[in-house]
Amino acid sequence: MADSDDEPITLSSHALAALQEFYGERDARADKFEKLKAATEDQHDAAAAAAQPLSMDAFTEDWNASQFWYSDETATLLAKQLLDGVREDEVIAVVSTPSVFVALKNLLNAADANTPKPKKVLLLEHDQRFSVFPEFVFYDFQQPFKLPAELKGAVDRIIYDPPFLSEDCQTKIALTVRWMSRPGPRLRLVVCTGERMEPLITKLYRALGARATTYELVHARGLSNEFYCYANFECDAWKYRGGERG
């Protein structure tokens, strides 16, 4: 038994190949992240990097932190709805939805000089890896009002995807959204979360007019939970589900 315990552990060729592929992908992502970080820290490199599309490949999903990135197509469509009709005095806040933020950056970097651009785009996010972007604002939903004071009542367009399907998380982020929202009819709100949260979302955002839409969100690596896109407006990409609600 002792001799058997001392024998080295060996892997099959298939298992060894899979392990090597895993480490190769991990190292490639780490290299992309370091290059992105270096580019954003150097003003000259940042200008050059802006000409190249950004990718979420540099940021590994942490499923324990409930991170599930959208597909490029979904992220880009949502970003376009945030930019549609935007004015140059408006502020966009992307909350806990970094894949949409990256898509927004790509659209704005690719836009010509005549395309209206928002005054400011912010990423409110808990994951400190995204602090490589100058638009990063640390955000913890457990402290819904712990944000720069100048954001109060100053945001015109908001998208968020709560990290957890719980009433506590949804309610606290709703407090943040209402605190940030600029009063008036121009507010554009998009909420991406589970289908089972519909009664709560309808209740939390009744005053802002957000309702479930027909748009089907797609995650890059798939997701077992059924997700809805809720919004306070209709557009070419979606209509409200089920007609008028009481």
Image (spheres, rainbow, N blue to C red):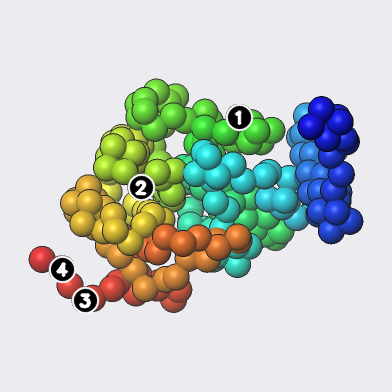
Labels 2 and 1 touching (C-beta < 8 A): no
Mark 1 or 4: the one toward you: 1
- Which is closer to the viewer, label 2 or label 4? 2
- Marks 2 and 3, how far apart at CA: 25 Å
Three-letter code, disc 1: Gln
Q: CA distance from mark 2 to mark 4?
A: 23 Å
- Tell which residue pokes out farthest to the left in this image: 246
Dot 1 or dot 4: first in sequence order is 1
Q: Judge by depth and name the residue closer to the eye, 196 or 188.
A: 196
Image quadrant occupied by the N terminus: top right
> Can you identify the residue that label 2 sits on?
165
Q: CA distance from mark 1 to mark 3?
A: 41 Å
Q: Secondary structure at mark 3?
A: loop
Q: Earlier in the sequence, mark 2 or mark 4?
A: 2
90 sits left or right of 37 in the view: left
Residue behind mark 4: 245
Q: Position of residue 17 (x, y in %)?
A: 86, 55
**Residue 85 appears anywhere in the view:** no
Disc 2 to disc 3: CB gap under 8 Å: no
Q: What kind of element bears circle 4?
A: loop
| Above or below: residue 201 compared with residue 63 | below
| Residue at the image point whose x is 57% and y is 53% from the top | 69
Give x and y (percent) for residue 32: 81, 43
Task: Confirm or deny contact between disc 1 and disc 3 (CB under 8 A).
Answer: no
Q: Is residue 200 left or right of residue 181?
A: left
